[in-house]
Image (cartoon, rainbow, N blue to C red):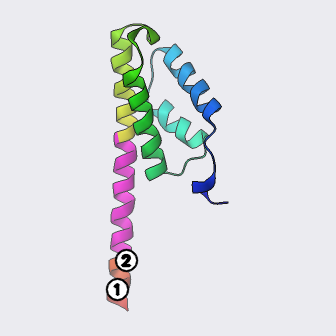
């Protein structure tokens, strides 16, 4: 079974999100770590997860957070993790492109 065929552990995802929100002071690394703990590969799977988490956080009612500042900080933290995941994916794609270019030149 490939990585794409593995179902996401939704209960673990939701439990972890509740824990992060309850903590009130999220850091980008908490969201990145969550993706790794769920067994997601870097790149598109992680980017899609973080994008989905950001969408969830933005749609939760204000009362789900300690205050509006906590809500904004939470969304900012997941956005920072998302930006980092996108940057890593772009670097990986650039590296692959360079390797493919070198292989074409050597053939």
Residue 76's quadrant in the figure? top left
At which x and y percent is residue 69?
33, 12
For the point 39% across and 54% down, which residue is it?
A: 89
Residue 104's quadrant in the figure? bottom left
In reply to whether residue 70 is colored magenta, the answer given is no
At which x and y percent is residue 8?
60, 42
| Badge 2 element | helix
Q: Which residues are magenta?
A: 83-99
* In the displayed structure image, the side of residue 5 where residue 27 appears, left or right: left
At which x and y percent is residue 10?
61, 34
Read off the residue under disc 1: 104
Quadrant in the picture for the N terminus: bottom right
Image mark for residue 16 = none
Regarding residue 43, the answer to whether it shows in the image is no
| Badge 1 element | helix
Read off the residue under disc 2: 100
For the point 52% across and 15% down, which residue is it?
A: 23
């Amino acid at each position: 079974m490939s990585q794409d065929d593995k179902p996401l552990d939704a209960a673990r995802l939701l439990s972890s999100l509740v824990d992060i929100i309850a903590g009130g002071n999220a850091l980008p690394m908490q969201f990145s770590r969550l993706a790794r703990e769920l067994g997601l590969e870097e790149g598109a799977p992680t980017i899609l997860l973080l994008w989905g988490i950001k969408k969830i956080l933005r749609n939760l009612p204000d009362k789900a957070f300690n205050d509006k500042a906590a809500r904004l900080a939470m969304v900012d933290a997941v956005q920072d993790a998302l930006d980092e995941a996108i940057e890593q994916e772009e670097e990986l794609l650039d590296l692959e492109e360079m390797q493919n270019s070198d292989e074409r030149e050597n053939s």
